[in-house]
Amino acid sequence: MLTVDDDLSGPEVADLVGYHMREMRAHSPEPSRHSLDLTSLRTPEIAWWTVWDGHSLMGCAALREVDSGHGEIKSQRTAPEHLRKGVAKALLSHIIGVARDRGYIRLGLETGSGPAFDPALALYRRFGFKDGEMFGDYRPDPFLRFMHLDL
């Protein structure tokens, strides 16, 4: 398993981000959906990583700088054929390390609620994330969950 900085240009990445967007549409109501498409992910404040097994894309995730001390995890997704292989754990470990290297004091994320989000919530809790307050430009929404990790 190899984690690499990625420029979002490969067709495998486009396919996985497209899958992520379809899954978010299937499990999140429209006003509660904050997933980013390829164009939205290609901004200077977002760093993007992918995990590979040879030529097979296993997963992806992004880190958005909210401000100089706060990062936000975005678009974390494991390819369906690579579930339960430690991909999400590897990506989350990598992002936490980058956030610490950048000097962030806090790492946050926004996710949904309901059964489709339970595995992600469990993973974040295993890493020490706690339920917390809304941040950034988000608006109050009963479907959304916010989690934070003090670094």
Image: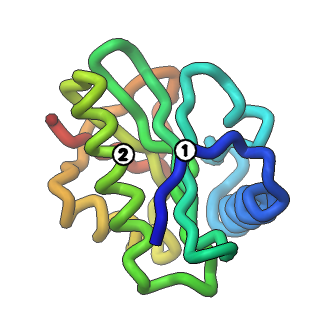
Q: At which x and y percent is residue 116?
A: 52, 74
Q: Secondary structure at mark 2?
A: helix
Q: Indicate the amino acid at tag 1.
A: Asp
Q: Residue at x 63, y 59 (%)?
A: 28
Q: At which x and y percent is residue 118?
A: 39, 73
- Which numbered marker is on residue 5? 1
- Check disc 2 and report the residue beneath it: 95
Quarter of the picture containing the C terminus is top left
Q: 140 above or below 14?
A: above
Please, which residue is most extreme toward the right here?
11
Viewer can see residue 65 = yes
Between 53 and 66, which is closer to the camera in this rendering?
Answer: 53
Between 26 and 128, which is closer to the camera in this rendering?
Answer: 128
Viewer can see residue 25 = no
Q: Secondary structure at mark 1?
A: strand
Q: Residue at x 35, y 56 (%)?
A: 92
Q: 128 above or below 19?
A: above
